[in-house]
Image (spheres, rainbow, N blue to C red):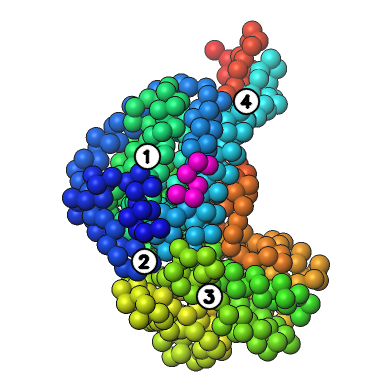
Amino acid sequence: MTHTDILAKSGLTAADLTGGSLAVRSPVDGAALATVTEIDAAAMPGVIASAKAAFNEWRKVPGPKRGELVRILGEELRAEKETLGRLVTLECGKIYQEGLGEVQEMIDICDFAVGLSRQLHGLTIASERPDHAMRETWHPAGVVAVISAFNFPVAVWAWNTALALICGDSVIWKPSEKTPLTAIACQKILDRALARFADAPAGLHHTVIGGRAVGEALVDSPDVAIVSATGSTRMGREVAPKVAARFGRSILELGGNNAMIVTPSADLEMAVRAIVFSAVGTCGQRCTSLRRLIVHRSVKDQLLSRLTAAYKSVRIGNPLLDGTLVGPLIDKASFDGFSAAIANAKAEGGTVLTGGERTLTAEFPDAYYVTPAIVDMPAQSAVVKHETFAPILYVLTYDDFDQAVHLQNDVPQGLSSCIFTTDVRESEFFLSAQGSDCGIANVNIGPSGAEIGGAFGGEKETGGGRESGSDAWKGYMRRQTNTVNYGRSLPLAQGIKFDL
Ligand code: NAD
C-alpha cells in the first residue's frame, strides 16, 4: 500500500492534508505527507468556552448513558483497527504489529470504561453522630486537556478520553505536532461515534493541532479543570508549576529510565527475549523502554553473549513490512540525541558491545534508522541517569543484591522496573517498600507492554500521574463528602458544645 493509499483509507481529505503551515514527514522514509492547518493560539479561549458549555450539559447525562457513547467508539475503533494501525506506523514509525497493538489498547480501554460507567462508586461512611449518614460521591470535574507525545500518538488519547467521557467531562486534545494526522483520523472516528450516539452536546471533544503555544493556552486557562500531559520531563517541568499556580489539577506522565535486574537464578532464555523486546522494540521510543540492565557478575558474560547475538539477528527496516522488528527513529533531532549519548557513554568509560550506528542510509537517505546499541558501563554515570529516547541499553554489573536495588532506584525517573529471578526472597524484596521505587515493578517480564487493567504511571521525575485502569478514573472526577442529618437535633462532631 502506498503512503497516499494509507492516508486516503484513513479518511484524510485534501483539506486535512494541504494548505497549512505544519509540515508532516513520515519517519519511514522522510516523505512529505501533509501540510496541516494549525489552530491560532488566539482562538483557544473560544475552544475552551465551547468545551465548558458542553461539559455543563454532559455532566447531566447519566454515567451508563455516557458509557454508551464510549461503547460505540469502541465499535468504530474495531472497524478501523487495521487502517488506523497502519497510519500510526506511517506517521510515527513503529512497526505495524505495534501500530495494531496500539489500536487494540484503545479498544480495550473503551471496553473497560463502558463497564466503569456503571461503577463510579463512592463510599458510605459511618457517622459518629446519631441519625446522620455520611457518604462520598464522585462528580464530573470539568474540561480535561489531553496533551500527548508522538510515540503513542493514539493510545494515550484513548486512555484519557474514554475515562474522561464516562466520568462526565469534556475533552480538548492537543496531540504532538509530530503526529497530527493520526489525531485528525481519531477525531473523525469519534465524530462517527458521536453521530450514531446522537445525544452528545456540541463541543464535547475538540482536537487542536498546534505547538507549544496551543498547549500553553490549555495549561494556563482556569477553565481547564484537569491537564493530563504526556511527554518529556522537560515539558512536565514547564506545565506542572503553571497548573499548580492556578490550583488546577495535572496528571503527568513523563520520562522513564527503566531497568531490569538479572540475578544469578534468572531464566536467561526468558530474560534475553524480554530484554530484546523491551530495549529495541519501538526503536527504544517507549516511555517504558528498557534502558538499564543491572546484571550479576556471575551471569554477565553468558547473558551478554546471548544478547549481542540476538541483537544482530533483529530485522531493522521499513516498519510497514511484515517481519521488521525495528523501525526508524522519529527524526534527525532524535538521531542526534542517540549519537551524542553514545559519544558521552564512551567518554564516561563505556564500551559499545554492539550497534550505535546509523544504518540503511542508501535505501532511506532521508530517514533515521539505527542499529540498537548495548554499552557496558563502569558505573551509573551521568549519561545513564538521563533518558535518551532511542535504543541504547546500558549494562551495569553488581555483586550484592542490595547494590542492584540501589542502582535501580538511583536515577531521577521512576516509571517502570523489573527483576528476573527464581528466588522468591529477591522477587518479594524487589516488590516491597524497600525495593523498586517505580510506579511499575514486574517479576520475570520486561518493563514495557503494560495491560490497560492496571493503573499506569510513575514516581519522581516521571510525574506521579496515573492513567488507564484500576481506580485511575478518580483522577478525572471531583470528590464530594456529604453528611445528611435525618434527626431532629443538631449534634456537633467531636462532641463540641455550642449552646445558644
Ligand atoms: P515532548 O515533551 O517533546 O512533547 C509532548 C507534548 O507536550 C507535545 O504535544 C508538545 O507539543 C507538548 N508541549 C511541549 N512543551 C509544552 C509546554 N510548555 N506547554 C504545553 N505543552 C507542551 O515529548 P515527545 O518527544 O513527544 O515524547 C517523548 C517523551 O514522552 C519521552 O520523554 C517519553 O518518556 C515521554 N512519554 C511518557 C509516557 C508516560 O506515560 N510516562 C508515555 C509516552 C511518552
Task: Answer left or right for 425 relative to 230.
Answer: right
Q: Secondary structure at mark 4?
A: strand
Comes first in the chain, label 4 or label 3: 4
**C-alpha distance separating marks 4 and 3:** 57 Å
* Residue at the spot of label 4: 135
Residue 315 image label: 3
Pointer 2: residues within 10 angstroms few (<14), some, or many (20+)? many
- The image shows residue 463 at horizontal and vertical percentages of 48, 57
Q: Secondary structure at mark 1?
A: helix
Q: Establish if 330 lies above or below 110.
A: below
* Residue at the spot of label 2: 27
Q: Main secondary structure of the magenta part?
A: helix
Q: Establish if 50 lies above or below 61.
A: below
Residue 5 visible at all = yes
Q: Read off the magenta span.
A: 78-83
Q: Amino acid at mark 4?
A: Arg
**C-alpha distance separating marks 4 and 1:** 40 Å
* Residue at the spot of label 1: 188
Observer-side mark, 4 or 1, equals 1
Q: Observer-nearest residue: 342 or 99? A: 99
Observer-side mark, 2 or 3, equals 3
